[in-house]
Image (cartoon, rainbow, N blue to C red):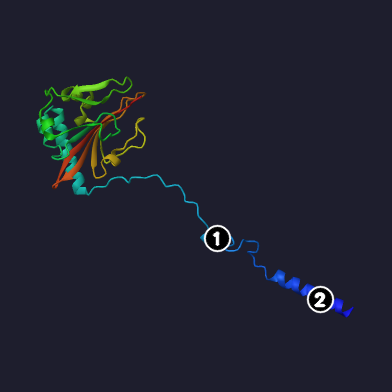
Amino acid sequence: MAGGRVATLCAVLLLAAACGSRAPGAGVPPGASAPLTAPASEAPQRTPPPSPTVLPSATAAPADEAAIRGRAKDALAALRAKDLARFASFVHPAKGVRFTPYTFVQPGKDVVLSRAAVAKGLADPQRYLWGYTDGKGDPMDWTLGEFFERHLWTRDYAAAPVTLFDHYPEVRGNKFDNTQKAYPGGHTVEQYFPARPNTLDWSGLRLVFERDGGEWYVVGAIHDEWTI
């Protein structure tokens, strides 16, 4: 009897030792690592979607704003007089001037004219594809003179009732205004005609200026109006 009890006790002790020797990773094949759970602080984090790029409104020192407004006034006077040779003196000497027919600037598509090309004036027979007419989509295959008369200078913008400096409207028409993105170092002066009651006949002409050699020059001329 005593021998049987001793044998039973030994069997129990051996079984307990075997169970206690099993690590938490028991059952993992030899040479393999037990799966680990990363601490909460090290657990993979979901990356939030990037925020949309918001371009701050351009700012200009008071002296620069005064200079730009003065240059814009003189450039508009030259356009009013249809004196393109005079207007050319305000055009950027290296970049020329980009003409945008409907608010949304399209680098690589909008016509860019050098000082020399602008100075040829409204009688120059050279034709350019300025874009496509709103609604109909007809090609604006026009000379500079035709573009000036039929689209750019449709009103006397030099006498517009509202002058806006560095103003980028979020909502005005149905085309996106990307002026700040297209001209990140520029400042704008816009001559604006508000809509008459119960109409959508508002329009504006925005001149974009950039500094070169201490002077401010026109690098963009953007016509803005209601489009469908």
**Dot 1 alpha-carbon crowd within 10 angstroms: few under 14, some 14 to 19, many 20 or more:** few
* Position of the N terminus by quadrant: bottom right
Task: Please state which amino acid type lies under the numbered disc 1.
Answer: Ala
Please name the residue shown 31% across and 23% down the image.
134
Q: Where is residue 214 in the image (x, y as percent from the top left)?
A: 14, 48
Which residue does the image show at 23% across and 42% down from the upper left?
Answer: 187
Q: Which residue lies furthest to the front in this view?
A: 3
In the rendered image, is residue 149 in sight?
A: no
Residue occupying image coordinates x 14% and y 24%: 126
**Residue projecting furthest to the bottom:** 2
Q: Nearer the viewer, residue 14 or 174?
A: 14
In terms of sequence position, does the residue under pointer 1 or pointer 2 come before the other?
A: 2
Q: Is residue 25 above or below residue 176?
A: below
Residue 121 lies in what quarter of the image?
A: top left
Mark 2: which amino acid?
Leu
Q: Is residue 186 visible?
A: yes
Q: x and y percent of residue 151 in the render?
A: 23, 24
In this picture, is 50 found above or below 137? below
Q: Which label belongs to residue 3?
A: none
Q: Which of the pair 155/145 is nearer the observer?
A: 145
Circle 2 residues within 10 Å: few <14, some 14–19, many ≥20? few
Q: Element at badge 2?
A: helix
Q: Residue furthest right?
A: 1
Of 26 and 225, the residue lying toward us: 26
- The residue beneath circle 2 is 9
Q: In this view, does 147 lie above or below 13?
A: above
Whether 181 is drawn above or below 8: the answer is above
Q: Badge 1 is on which residue? A: 40
Q: What element carries label 1?
A: helix
Spatial separation of the CA atoms under disc 1 and disc 2 = 45 Å
Quarter of the image for residue 83 reads top left
Number of callouts: 2
